[in-house]
Structure formats: structure tokens, C-alpha cells
Image: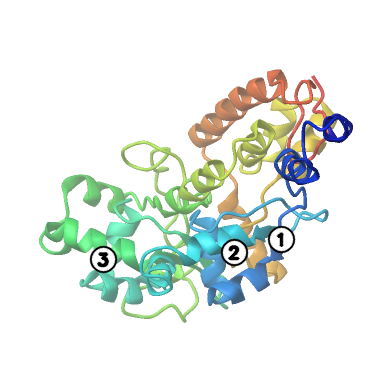
Amino acid sequence: MKVQALERASAGRETPEDVCAEQSVAEPDARPPELLSGPRAAGELGLRRGEFARAVQLGLVRPGPRAAGGAARFTRAELDRVRAGEGYPGALRERVETVAGADAGARALGTGPSRFTRLARCGHLTPVGYRINRYRAVVWLYLAAELREFAAREPGMLSGAAPPEDREMMEAKADLRPRRGGGRPVGGVLSRTGEDRAGAGAGGPAPRGGGRGGPPAAAGPRGGGGPRHVGLLLRRTADPWERAAVLASVLPEQQVRQAVPDPAERIVLAALAPPPPYGHPQVPAAAAVAGRLLLAEPPDEVHWYRTSLDFALTGARGRRNSTGERGQSNSTGERGPT
């Protein structure tokens, strides 16, 4: 294109200024966008580390291309978009504010801790995360804004007798929080968590054998849909191999081996597997407790994820991307075996 433009200019049909103008249009600046690390992006947005991680989890801040080591990076254009949002930064902080446990959640909801625990266990309230306290008990985290919205939308649930279906679930010691919030029940139902001890605080050790022995809760949250954490991860990518990796990450290893017999495909899925949610403990004893929240165990739930993984793999294996390779992941740049 440069040669053709110069030939036209030498023939007198264009001036040198025309050539420069044409080059500026035909050859835009190809410099890659500036990419910022997570801590730097959080600082520029005026968010604490936990607030920023929650904003990314909820899709309020969209990550850009990953670094070579897999760490998330963020474009300056994305930070400008977030800063241009209405009510920034206060509105953004309100959307990512969390409360931990039944006592704090009850205060945000305007009810008592016991009722809050029942609403959460029966699936009316959806956790957004968790942490493990020093007694290795699970303490669920809730978005404060969602609790306030629930209180305004369902004032009748904050007083009066529990509905019959809730009473049945509580008698069976069922607990939908793991399935709705991103973890899974341990052995069908979760052993008593820190927030279950309403009124006693989350500081004491969990009673032995408490909260177990009931039948498993129904798969998935009321009204359909999947666990919140998995759903948020799936919403953040359209890459078929990444979506398959999200589904594989919640299945036991034996199920993954049965669904993906090809070792090369399992390597691709392992490379694309999402990291644990923010706040996942590093201490081995606590990590072992939290790790059980991340895997499906009840047969109906395992079957649901296994079926979803099979469907996702069918699309990933048959997808033809822009390079013409079949089954290639845009994230790894490697061709998934077919």
C-alpha cells in the first residue's frame, strides 16, 4: 500500500500530505493496550483487594488478556469504563460490600440470626463466597445489597411462621447454601457451619456430628439454575474449552477421567481450570475443609455436571476457530485433541 501511494504521488496525482494522511488511516497504531496487574488496577479504582476481587467475580470489572503465567491483567480502557459508571466509587463499593455470618447478615436483613439461618439454608438467600474460621467451620458471605433488596421485596419472610417446605427442609437438616453459593454439600448436607450457631457467635467449635444424617437437598437452587460461583465463571467466557474446564473443575477426578479419556484433553482442561474463589484458605487444614465445598458429591448433582461437561466438550471438540484448527482454545493457543 505504501508503494502504491508513493507511485501516485510521484505521478502528480497526490501530494505528500495526502500520502501521509492515507498511511495514518490505513495503518492504525498497532501497539497493544496497556495491561495492569490486579493490585495496581485495584489501587487505581480505589478498592481494597477483597473489594476488587469481588468486583471481578461479579463481572463488574472485566479482566483482559492474561499474562504468560496466567495472572489476570486489566486494560486501562476497562478501568476508565468502571470509573465512568454512575455513582462511582460509592455505588461500586456498595455493590461489592459483603457481610459474614448469621449475626451480621441478620442485621443487614432486619431480622434475627435464627430466621436468617433458616432463610439461607432453605435457599432464599444466596451466598457469594465463604471463609473458614479458626475452628474450621464455614462462614458464608453475602452481598449486603442483595440482603437489603430481599428485605424490601419479601417483607413477609422476615416475620411469622416458616412455610411448610422450609420446616421440612430444616427437619431433614438440608442445606442449600453450598450448592447456591459455589460450594457443594459434604455427604449430601453440610455439617453445621459457624453461622448456624446463631446467638452463640461463630467462635466456638462445631459440635461433633451436628447437622448430618439428613437426606440430600434437591439438586440446584430453587427455581432452577446452577451454583452461583460456577454460573459467574461461565458468564465470564465464551471460549468452549474454558467453559468445559469450569464444569470439569467441580467434578471428582474419577468422573473427569471417565468423561475425558484422552490425557491430552485433560491437560488442556487442567491448564484452563479456574483458581479457587477469593478467600480460599492456604492453611492445609482449612483448605481441606474448603476444598470439599468445591466438588460435587450427591449423585444427582454429579450427574448434572457430568452431562453439562459432555455437552460442552462436544462443542469444544467440534469448534473451528479463526485459525482453522479444530478444538483449539483461544486461551491457551493449543489445539485440543479430537
CA–CA distance between discs 2 and 1? Answer: 21 Å
User: Camera-side residue: 26 or 190?
Assistant: 26
CA–CA distance between discs 1 and 3? Answer: 36 Å
Residue 325 spot, x, y in % from top left: 80, 22
For label 2, the SS is loop
Whichever of labels 1 and 3 marks the residue nearer the N terminus, that label is: 1
Residue under numbered circle 1:
35
* Image position of 301 (left or right of 167): right
Residue under numbered circle 2:
278
Residue under numbered circle 3:
148
- Compared with 58, 308 (above or below) is above
Residue at image x 36%, y 36%?
224
Q: Pick the quarter of the image with the C terminus.
A: top right
User: Camera-side residue: 15 or 56?
Assistant: 15
- Compared with 319, 213 (above or below) is below
Q: Quadrant of residue 308?
A: top right
